[in-house]
Amino acid sequence: MLDILSEPFFRRAIMAGLAVALVAGPIGCFIVWRRMAYFGETLAHAGLLGAGLGLLFNVNIAVGAIVVAMILALVLIALRRQQQLAVDTILGILSHTALALGVVVIGLVTGAVTGHLDILFGDVLTVSTADVWTVWGVTALALILLGLLWRRMIAISVHEDLARAEGINVQRVELLFTLLIAFVVAISMKIVGLLLITALTVIPAAAARRLSATPEGMALLSIVFAALAVLAGLFMSAAWGTVAGPSIVLSAGLLFVLTLPLGRRS
């Protein structure tokens, strides 16, 4: 099975997958700490709508995904301020509306949604060299931004009111973090697809939380788990002919199950 490593397409898939793991791991930590999994799912569904609009207006679908995700985040912030509906209710409405509208737009533009299942479930084995460079470039930018926000995000995660009292602009930091999630959504379309990206951020972070004593340790361990999931999923796909994206997420789920007896953190 190791002979597959001699194939250029497989090496490109590994490089792209590891790049996503490098940024999805630490971002997933904040998603877990702040209980934002449903929020991440909403942005992923917004990415599908953005991809559909990208196809409609003949622009890069990754750019469309980022733009629509940010617009949806601004809409969410505005609705939260009105305090007329619970946050989970707002997320439910926006998430499924964006998903349905994205499917409709893609169907209208292309005539069939089935021709773009790679957007939903990824197709990492078909990434080109240019795709790999793009993914690593966006990953580098995301990691730089995450490094700048790290301490402030930890302070907000510990106690939002205290962070605000210390002079941290919570709303601005949250908006920048939303941009980070949008970046991850955009570069992950080819890797695991828009419907599964939340799992690749949340599951490794959840597994790492049980085994870590510090935020930095949890971030590093989540990167390791995400990378292991990528490698295991790709080799599973090569060995058994399964779809690569879901195989990566399944591997992450299995890693989480294996960590259950090893730690006490929830």
Image: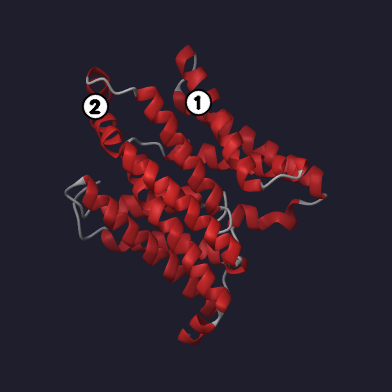
Q: Nearer the viewer, residue 148 or 32?
A: 148
User: Which element type, helix, strand or loop, lies under badge 1?
Assistant: helix
Q: Position of residue 222 (x, y in %)?
A: 32, 55
Q: Residue furthest right?
A: 111
The quarter of the displayed image where residue 252 is located: bottom left
- Whichever of callouts 1 and 2 sits on the residue coming sooner in the sequence is 1
Residue drawn at 53 percent across, 77 percent down: 238
Residue drawn at 52 percent across, 46 percent down: 185
Residue 89 tag number: 1
In the image: residue 78, left or right of residue 260: right
The amino acid on which the numbered mark 1 sits, given as a three-letter code, is Thr
Q: Position of residue 115 (x, y in %)?
A: 74, 57
The quarter of the displayed image where residue 152 is located: top left
Residue 80 tag number: none
- Coloring basis for residues: secondary structure
Residue 159 tag number: 2
The answer to whether one can see residue 83 in this image is no
Q: Residues within 10 Å of mark 2 (few under 14, many from 20)?
A: few
Q: Nearer the viewer, residue 103 or 46?
A: 46
Q: Nearer the viewer, residue 13 or 225?
A: 13
Total labels drawn: 2
Q: Position of residue 235 (x, y in %)?
A: 47, 75
The answer to whether one can see residue 85 in this image is yes
Q: Position of residue 72 (x, y in %)?
A: 56, 30
Disc 1 and disc 2 in contact, CB within 8 angstroms: no
User: Which element type, helix, strand or loop, lies under badge 2?
Assistant: loop
Q: Is residue 100 above or below residue 122?
A: above
Q: Is residue 141 above or below residue 247?
A: above
Residue drawn at 18 percent across, 47 percent down: 214
Residue drawn at 53 percent across, 52 percent down: 187
